[in-house]
Amino acid sequence: MMKQIYLSIILSSFIFTLQAQYYSSGADPANIKWQQVNSDVFKVVYPEEIEAEAKRFIAMLDSLYEYGGHTLAHTPKPIKVIMHAHSAYSNGFVSWAPKRMEIYPTPHQDMFAQDWLEQLAIHEFRHVVQIDKLNKGFTKILTIPFGQQAIGAVLGLYAPLWFLEGDAVLTETTLSESGRGRRPSIEQEIRAQVIEKQIYHYDKAYFGSYKDYVPNHYNMGYLLTAGARHSFGSNVWERALDEAARKPWSITPFNRGIKQVTGKNKVPLYNEVFKDWHQRWLDTNDSLSLTKQSNITQRDTRYKNYRYPTAIDDTHIIAEVNGVGELNHFVKINTKTKEEEKILITGSRAREPFSYADNKIVWTELEQHPRWENQIFSVIRLFDLTTGKQKKLSYNSRYKAPAISSDGKTIAVTHTSLSNQHSIHLLNVNDGTLIKEIAIPDNAYPLSPSWDLNGEAVTMVLLTKAGKQIVTLSPKTDEWSEITKPDCIEIRFPKFIDEHIYFAGSYSGIENIYRVNINGNNLEKVTESQFGAAYTTLSDNQLIYQNYTSDGYMLVSKEIRNIQTMPWKIKPLPIEPYINKLQEDEKGLPNLKDVSTKGYQAKKYSKWNLFNFHSWAPAFVNVNEATITPGASIMSQNLLGTTFITAGYNADQQYSREKFNLKLSYQAWWPVFDLELKAGNETIEGSYTNETNWYENVIDAKPNHYLVDFKMKLPLNYSRGKYIRSIQPSAGISYQKSEDFNYERNYFKLDENGIPIKENEEYVIDYSETITYEGIDIKSTNYSFFAYNLLRSTQRDVASRWGQVLELSYRNTPFGGWDYGSILGIHSRLYFPGIGRHHAIRIDNDWHFKEKGEIHKSGETYNHHLIFSDYVRFPRGVNGIVNDDLYSFKGDYMMPLLSPDFNIPGLVYLKRITTNLFYDFSQATQRLQYTETKDWITNKYNFSSLGTEIRGELHPFRFVFPISLGYRYAYLPESKEHYHEVLFSMGLSGIIVGNK
């Protein structure tokens, strides 16, 4: 019985998984000139400005081809790659349906000691191997009727995200001398959690929690995949994927593959692996002589990070704060009284420091181009603590990690051009104008620049081919000086303090504060932290830095004269023997640093490559509504993400009017053009007897129906700072037509009393006539304007706690045909903060007004006019009535109720329960016209409801997408009725695997 239930859930989930995998990252600027370079396996499409890097990237992929899939015993089939070089956002991902790799080649400031394109090549190619390996056995058979979506569906159903990302992180570690597996941050959060709290059960560790902070699936996944491979060999994950590919129809094939090698299911394997890690960490912990320090910030069990402490005087520091329940913001902290003052909430930030001097804070934020999703800028903002005013110093820029000089006049900042050439820009702090551009030797990438107190030198980390090293730069002479030698061990955040450069280093396997003389001599260890310390500042002879705990980074201090340093010699990381054993499984280390690009020829890639049919089905798949009916369908999405096509045949008789479907969306220009075509016919047969006028209508017809919808919209994103903003005007036309058809009307012969005559129990026909039924002929126009301004939300918020939403809509029929009149609709929504943390108040005020169209038919009392359907909804639980005007008020108080983290292993994991109290009110107006007198009367009706909704967010059967299951109760005062409703929804996001 359990097997049948589970199979039913798999089949149901398949529909939702199909919907989730169709992902688009958005469009690139329309003026880009696209090029391509090809090899036997890869096609890389890129903007012409980044040609040299594109050739280097495809050469890396070709070099990786024999290495990247060795431990999974697979070499993948050809795949296309697109590079979004006009974005300052850094990432990469692989998606199926359609299958492709998308790369954002601009480096970021939180990199480990490896070239950014090398990181992307290893990590993303591993994802290609993982997914392509599923194309075998029964899954490959499924691709015949379903195309690429079959692989995507099996991926979503069976391959956990922790495996996909953890295995890719493991591969970037074993196929290089760097990789996140050598970086303490990969284990820092889980190590602190396990030592100070506990090993969370598998469901909580995978699906997360609203109650406790849970490290992401990259960290969990790396430790689990590496631990299992270290103990049982590389074939554990090869067998798991192989089973999922060959037998997707069976129960938990991925789990069964793991058990065939390890003898354990994934949950016991998880417990064993993390028990082993726990013991390793305890052994390390016992060997530490922890630095004695004083806390500046209080520990917050809700999880809060204080990062980048920066002294502004002898008693105050500024820090950046974030966490799962915190909007990213700057705070000023009194180091003596521990009082905090919030300065401002920032916008979208990459992980990089801010800078302070002369009462000014400077930092960068990511800003999307209003129209192009794949053109993201990194702009510099400045906040003046004296005036309390904020301004933007750069526009449409590609800056990272600005550092302001101590006199507050000059900003040194990392700049990356569209061709990935790196330099240091010196900017005027008043207006952001460029003072000077300084080239960097060998195009090394600069990380976290910082000035000395005299404004004569800038120190930074340079990421070179050989690894990371600390250098100094004289902005006056452009002279570079080497402080440390390049190495693959993680170092970051160099700062001038007295005669030393302090920085965070990972030499011991735990990140700590180190220092070196400004001449590069005498490397010393400054702190011994249990879980990790970084980023120093000096205030009133106190060395202040961030120190990690299981509840986030805290700020701590130690008097600098009491610091006992330890001379340090660089040696292999403690984790290196562990990684060396894992590397024995590999074929070797590919050479990615000095690849040759001579054999690759570039050629033009046309923007008019519009078609890429990737998936199909022997059924009609409605992706938007997540339904499947008998029929056939086919889908296309081109590589540039500008053209989307869905075509299909719906054989369900309920949808006979729209048997043939075509949807086309073209998104390459500023306006987006959407076209939808539907065609079909409707079988109308049977007879109807009118016992008043004594006739019979006999109908045997099959009129054709057609629908054409064309819409032009302009989606604009103006998200800036702490607000998410969007504006979208649109205009469209719709034409709906059905053919006229004829039917016979037979009049019965009546006797002298007006009673129809019957012979042999059948009415005797007196005479007949042919009647023409006029088909539908509706030509409507549609105009709308949609805009919102919403405060960014935290992970724990149930909704935005401040915001405004406005929509205007107008429809009419000005071009002849059936006259439906018009409808004007207005929707407004306001968000306010509630009483408690993460509570929110939502208030809707909606209204529509209809102008009646032509008389459709005349009843005995009233004429019946053609009118548009409602724009506004009635109160929850109320059955609506036909109306001309409708005003609606909806008020909700929403709040989290409980975060139980309750699980029945393998059956259900309940993360959170939320509730809201609501009150709805509507007033409907009817305008009726008497048939005989043509006079009008007006009736008004009031409706209301009040009640509550309760929802649980859960993962049944360890399904990756969260399901919301709830109950709604409403009391209807006017009718004194009680209303009950089951609520269900599913959170879907694209099935993509990537670098972050």
Image (cartoon, helix red, strand yellow):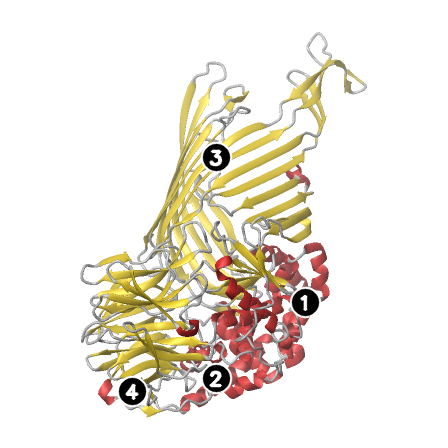
Q: Which mark is residue 191?
A: none
Type of amino acid under label 2? His
Label 2 to label 1: alpha-carbon separation? 33 Å
Mark 2 nearby-residue class (10 Å; few <14, some 14–19, many ≥20): some
Residue 263 seen by the camera: no
| Residue 333 occupies quadrant | bottom left
Say which of marks 2 and 3 sits in front: 3
Which residue is disc 3 drawn over?
A: 782
Label 4 to label 1: alpha-carbon separation? 54 Å
Which residue is disc 4 drawn over?
A: 292
Which residue is disc 1 drawn over?
A: 245
Say which of marks 3 and 4 sits in front: 3
Mark 2 / mark 4, whichever is N-terminal: 2
Horizontal side of residue 639 vs 841, given as left or right: right
Q: Residue at x 37, y 57 (%)?
A: 792
Position in image of residue 387 (x %, y %)? 18, 59
Position in image of residue 958 (x %, y %)? 56, 66
Position in image of residue 326 (x %, y %)? 34, 64
Circle 3 SS class: strand
Residue 190 seen by the camera: yes
Label 2 to label 3: alpha-carbon separation? 62 Å
Which residue is disc 2 drawn over?
A: 278
